[in-house]
Image (cartoon, grey):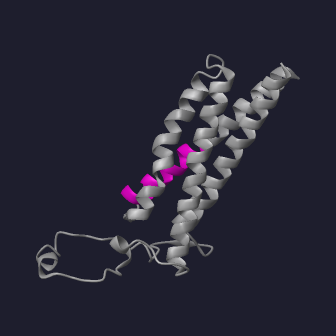
Amino acid sequence: MENQSISTNSSRVNAAFLIGFFTILGAWGFEHIGGFVPCELCLSQRLPYYFGLPLLALIVIFWTKIPTMFRIILTLIVAALFAWGAYMGGYHSGVEWGFWQGPTSCTGSADGLSFDALNNINEAKVVPCDQPQFRFLGISFAGYNAIISTIIASILAYSAWGQYKRNKQS
């Protein structure tokens, strides 16, 4: 039973890593192959993947070598990163649906426009955050990111809880 709980908790971390890894690969694929240009909010939603996946890789690789409490803390840190990613995806989805205002830098709601800004208009390409480039089943990229990030954060929190319970029993 003890070895089963070890493998179950590490399997959860492995699953979270693979889900995150294939999600960011998909985002890059839609960008570089599909031609979808990410907006400012889209790019910020990638940060949990850029910071969290390397940490998860270290946890996976050094699972038995990392002290248990340190591994639990790392797992919770990555879970918090993906919870923040879920929040950002939900926030971005709300901007797309018009539930609230997004950042003025990418929603076209800036208060003023100067003639200096117009001189560089051909060079600047602003991708609007409030107009989704894609929807599948009514859900945009941001919405799917919110769902996937929530799943990853939940799996990691569940793994951390299992690791804690196992550590407490031994």
Residue 81 pos. (x, y %): 55, 47
* Image point (50%, 76%), residue name: 96
The residue lying furthest to the right in this view is 1
56 displayed left or right of 35:
right
* Image point (59%, 57%), residue name: 86
Say if 112 sits above or below 15 in the image.
Answer: below
Q: Which span of residues is magenta-colored?
A: 17-32
Residue 21 pos. (x, y %): 54, 43
Q: Quadrant of residue 119?
A: bottom left
* Image point (63%, 73%), residue name: 137
Identify which residue, 165 or 130, lies in the foreground: 165
Residue 89 pos. (x, y %): 54, 62
Query: How many marks do you count on the picture?
Result: 0
Does the image show residue 9? yes
Residue 1 pos. (x, y %): 88, 23
Q: Magenta region, mostly helix, strand or loop? A: helix
Q: Quadrant of the C terminus?
A: top right
Does the image show residue 17? no
Q: Is residue 31 part of the magenta span, yes or no?
A: yes
Q: Is residue 130 part of the magenta span, yes or no?
A: no
Identify which residue, 79 or 147, lies in the foreground: 79
Q: Quadrant of residue 75?
A: top right
Q: Quadrant of residue 67?
A: top right
159 displayed left or right of 27:
right
